Structure formats: structure tokens, C-alpha cells
Amino acid sequence: MSRTQYFVVHHEGQWKVKLNGTHYGPYNSQAAAARAAVDAAHKAGDQGYDAQVLVQGQNNQFRTEWTYGNDPYPPRG
């Protein structure tokens, strides 16, 4: 089974969550979008999917923010 990846992206001037080519949001901040993505990924993980959240940073590079089964839920901070 492939990993379901939730991408937190800055798209058209707004923070959104991208999943399978579809954008969800907008959110007031990167942190709010990341929290929504982690919540969605956690639900997917509970349903048996290998889920992960990646956040777009400077230079448009992505970093892993949260991975189901590896990181605490709810996330700290």
C-alpha cells in the first residue's frame, strides 16, 4: 500500500492542504493548515492507511511534519 501524503502548501496567497491533487482550505496560517492535515492524516491512519504530513517551507522544499505511527497524536506544541 502506498503512503497517503497530505501537503501543506502556500497556494494562491493562502495556506491550504493538498491531497491527491485537490486543495482544501484556505486556513488562517501555516500552523492551522498543518493541524488540519495532521487531524485528517490521523483519521486515515486509524482506517489503516500509511499517512504522512509534509509542510512547504522556504525555497518550496517540503519537510516531514508528522507520520502516523511515528509521531504523537495530538502533536505537541
Image: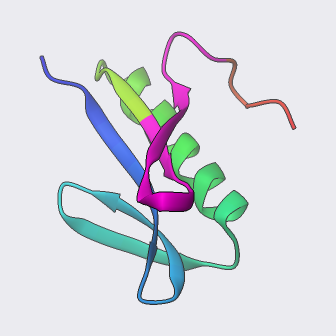
Magenta span includes 23? no
Residue beneath the point at 43% across and 50% down:
61
- 27, 42: nearer the viewer: 27
Colour scheme used in the picture? rainbow
- 37, 47: nearer the viewer: 37
Residue beneath the point at 31% across and 20% down:
50
Residue beneath the point at 68% across and 25% down:
73
20 w.r.t. 71: above or below: below
Residue 19 at what x, y percent from top left?
28, 55
Residue beneath the point at 39% across and 71% down:
24
Residue 66 at what x, y percent from top left?
56, 30
The answer to which image quadrant residue 74 occupies is top right
The magenta segment: 53-71
Figure label count: 0
Residue lying furthest top in this view?
A: 70
Residue lying furthest front in this view?
A: 59
The answer to which image quadrant residue 29 occupies is bottom right
Residue lying furthest bottom in this view?
A: 12
67 w.r.t. 10: above or below: above
Q: Is residue 22 left or right of residue 25?
A: left
Q: Quadrant of the C terminus?
A: top right
Q: Quadrant of the N terminus?
A: top left
Residue 49 at what x, y percent from top left?
28, 23
- 68, 59: nearer the viewer: 59
- 55, 22: nearer the viewer: 55
Residue lying furthest right in this view?
A: 77
Magenta span includes 67? yes
Residue 33 at what x, y percent from top left?
59, 62
Q: Is residue 13 left or right of residue 7?
A: right
28 w.r.t. 50: above or below: below
